[in-house]
Image: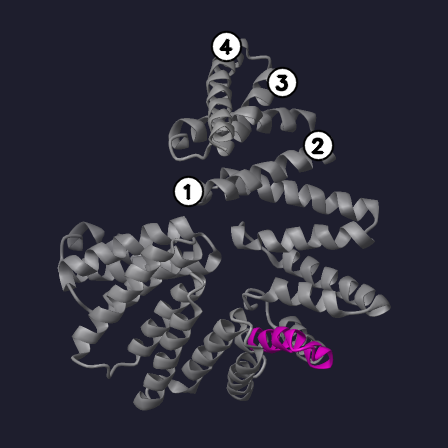
Amino acid sequence: MKLAEISLQMGFKNLKDSRSYRLAQSTYLYAEGEIYYRKGSLPRALMSLYRSLEIMEELLQSHTIATRCLNAIGNCHNRLGNTEEALKLYTRAYEMRKKLSGSKNHLDLPFYRGQIGTVYEGQKQYDKAIQCYQEALELSKELKLSGILRLALFHRNIANAYAWKRDYENAYKAAMDAYEIRKDILGDHPDTARSAFQVGLICRNLDDFDGAEEFLAEAWRIEKSLEYGNHSEVRDRIVQSYTSILPGEGKKAFQSEALEFYQRLWVEEEEFSYANKSIIDAINQLLDSSGDRKTIKKYEKEALRFYEMAWKSPDLQQLPYQERMEILQNILYLCKKLRQKELLKKYEGEQLQFLERQWEEKKEEMTTQDKVDILQTIQRLVERHGDERRREKYEIICEVIYSYCFAIRTASINRR
């Protein structure tokens, strides 16, 4: 990507308005967006992908690469929980690809159909999701173009949807189909670990505890064998689930092994990425039950450093309110625990400013209880900072809100 960026910069002066230069720029932005998506920097990914799509649609209108960009943007929105927007984007990708092909005879079509299914699954419309996954599976078999691995993906998704419906017999069959394909073709691979984990969870729900332990142990074995940066999306859930089914000394030994595993991952981290939040959190959770005070303090300091970077990162400024608030609360908690008084005072000031911005920008969208909660926190922080002007301002606002709440409650009682 750095080499590509240098090439674009070299051609900027003479080629910036040419069609070929702008298409190259669009391709670069698409690749950049996909990389940010995999790093977990979703707002930054969306910025690159939307810019890429804008150039593509201006120069190419409908095109295969435009459908893939639509799909990538849909992935970002799906992960952010914007399911309706994700559904629109996946559907646009599917319809554009079908129109380009003049039929259903293209390897991307089953994949996009499956993507639509993931939205339905996220919306708890499991029958619709299964229908989409089955259509994608059958279309892949007909085409014989998208490879056996694509079949494994659809089997896995079908298993997920059946598991959500608590139809574990059908879920087990589909999950095993996916696992066998991935094991045979990929061997030790993040996707194989993910499928082993899925089978293990389904076995546990079928009360097959021996099977659950076997497949969770296999998922953990694969995770340990993988190189840094190449772990499955369910890495942390594997650790949590395997811990929960192990008895006594076996659990204790595994927790020690998992701690060493996460510590190694943390040492290998060379640059800040919000996707590594789960690593430092897991280390501190595991140390709570078995760590010495010196090691605990060391990683609490590391966690404070990490969360400070997360709070200051431009890429994370657009995270949803709850996630930003969680980052801030972690900083405040660690400042108190590590007795960092000056830092605590600084971030209490940051918290006050953050909550005031939320109040001004979002108060019309808040429920009455949310308004009460945020105002109580603001009042407490204002009093702690001794800001008389702010104290008077929020005292008046609180009186209005509390009076409104009282009137609503009284009217409700009278109606009874």
Residue 349 shows in the view? no
| Dot placed on the residue nearer the N-terminal end, 3 or 2 | 2
Element under disc 3: helix
Q: Residue at x 54, y 89 (%)?
A: 184
Mark 3 neighbour density, 10 Å: few (under 14) some (14–19) many (20 or more):
few
Q: Which mark is residue 279?
A: none
Name the residue type under label 4.
Arg
In this view, the mark in front (2 or 4): 4
Name the residue type under label 3.
Arg
| Dot placed on the residue nearer the N-terminal end, 3 or 1 | 1
Mark 4 neighbour density, 10 Å: few (under 14) some (14–19) many (20 or more):
few
Q: Which residue is mark 4?
A: 389
Q: Position of residue 317 (x, y in %)?
A: 44, 40
Main SS, magenta region, reads: helix
Element under disc 4: helix
| Dot placed on the residue nearer the N-terminal end, 2 or 4 | 2
Report the Cα–Cα distance between label 2 and label 4.
27 Å
Q: Which residues are magenta?
A: 194-212
| Dot placed on the residue nearer the N-terminal end, 1 or 2 | 1
Q: Which residue is mark 3?
A: 384
On screen, 23 above or below 394? Answer: below
Q: Which residue is mark 1?
A: 318
Q: Tell me, yes or no, whether the highlighted magenta stretch contains residue 200.
A: yes
| Dot placed on the residue nearer the N-terminal end, 4 or 1 | 1
Q: Which residue is mark 2?
A: 336
Name the residue type under label 1.
Gln
Residue 296 shows in the view? yes
Name the residue type under label 2.
Lys
Element under disc 2: helix
